[in-house]
Image (spheres, rainbow, N blue to C red):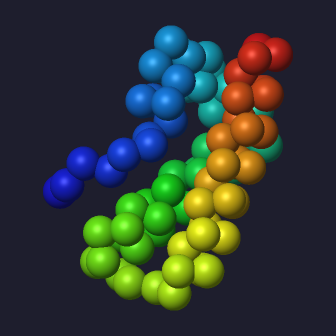
Amino acid sequence: MSHTPHELSEEFPDKVEAMQALKASNAHFSRLADEYHEVNRAVHRAETNVEPMEELAEVELRKKRAALKDEIWGMLANA
């Protein structure tokens, strides 16, 4: 399997333990992390032409990924 960039553990390497704890104790954080993972994989598949899509759709996925990442970071910063 190829390497998928922008995984949460790479984006926040110093917060891996906090992410694991939040995923176990906070259902909202767990859902956000799962959704981020799904969106990030979709972006990667589009960028590598495994599952090509229209440019506007790809841009919207990137925006969604960024919004999820911002919300995840907010929760990590307050943990």
Q: How many marks?
A: 0
Quarter of the rendering occupied by the C terminus: top right
In this rendered view, identify the residue nearer to me: 25 or 39: 39
Residue 46: quarter of image? bottom left
Q: Residue at x 46, y 19 (%)?
A: 13
Q: Residue at x 47, y 68 (%)?
A: 42
Direction from residue 2 to residue 51 in the image, left or right: right
Q: Residue at x 19, y 55 (%)?
A: 2
Whether residue 34 can be seen here: yes
Where is residue 24 shown, x and y percent of the image? Answer: 64, 30
Quarter of the rendering occupied by the N terminus: bottom left
Q: Residue at x 73, y 38 (%)?
A: 70
Where is residue 17 shown, x and y percent of the image? Answer: 53, 15
Direction from residue 20 to residue 52 in the image, left or right: left
Residue 60 position (above or below residue 53): above
Residue 54 position (above or below residue 18): below
In this rendered view, identify the residue nearer to me: 75 or 21: 75
Q: Give the farthest residue toward the left.
A: 1
Direction from residue 51 to residue 17 in the image, left or right: right
Where is residue 19 shown, x and y percent of the image? Answer: 59, 25
Residue 48 position (above or below residue 68): below
